[in-house]
Amino acid sequence: MNKAQLIDAMAADAGISKAQAKAALDSFTGKVGSTLSGGGRVSLVGFGSFSVSERAARDGRNPQTGAVIKIAAKKVAKFKAGADLNGKL
């Protein structure tokens, strides 16, 4: 399912227009992003939790030459599924 299909499904399920569903989805993704960039965490009971994890610096290899390269440390978004979501899988 892509973003357009998700917007269509949200609009149909909630009985709202596609424009309203798009605005709601954009608001949700924006707020999750801003919360995570501020170091926070977003928990949706039953669905899951979004958090920030730090990856340490490490050595990697250039696949063409085999040369060792340095991969910098960085922060990454992390999602852990909740019990209800896992139960649906």
Image (cartoon, rainbow, N blue to C red):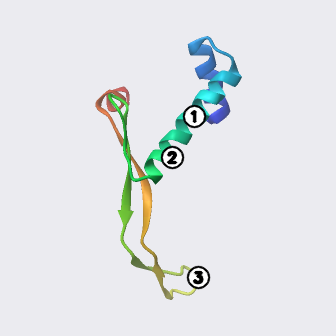
Instruction: Please report whichever mark, 3 or 2, sits nearer to the chain's N-terminal start.
Output: 2
Residue at figure coordinates x 69%, y 22% from the top left: 18
Q: Amino acid at mark 3?
A: Gln
Residue 9: give x, y in percent of width and height: 60, 21
Amino acid identity at mark 1: Ser
Q: Which image quadrant for residue 24?
A: top right
Q: Position of residue 3 (x, y in %)?
A: 63, 35
Residue at image position (45%, 45%) is 35
Mark 1, mark 3: which one is toward the viewer? Answer: 1
10 Å crowding of disc 1: few (<14), some (14-19), many (20+): few
Residue 64 tag number? 3
Q: In the displayed structure, would residue 72 be above or below residue 45?
A: below
Q: Are marks 1 and 3 in contact (CB under 8 Å)?
A: no
Q: Is residue 14 left or right of residue 47?
A: right
Residue 1 in sight: no
Amino acid type at image mark 2: Gly
Q: Quadrant of residue 56?
A: bottom left
Residue 70 location, x and y as percent?
A: 46, 82
- The span from disc 3 to disc 2 (Cα, nearest Å) is 35 Å
Q: Secondary structure at mark 2?
A: helix
Question: Between marks 2 and 1, how big is the CA–CA gap?
Answer: 10 Å
Left or right side of 31 for 12:
right
Q: Which residue is mark 1?
A: 27
Q: Of the residues under marks 1 and 3, which one precedes in the sequence?
A: 1
Mark 2 — residue?
A: 33
Instruction: Compare residues 36 and 12 and report the one nearer the observer.
Output: 36
Category of crowding for the residue at label 3, using alpha-carbon neighbours closer than 10 angstroms: few (below 14), some (14–19), many (at least 20): few
34 and 48: which is toward the camera:
34
The residue located at (54%, 39%) in the rendering is 29
Circle nearer the viewer, 3 or 2: 2
Q: Secondary structure at mark 3?
A: loop
Residue positioned most to the top:
15
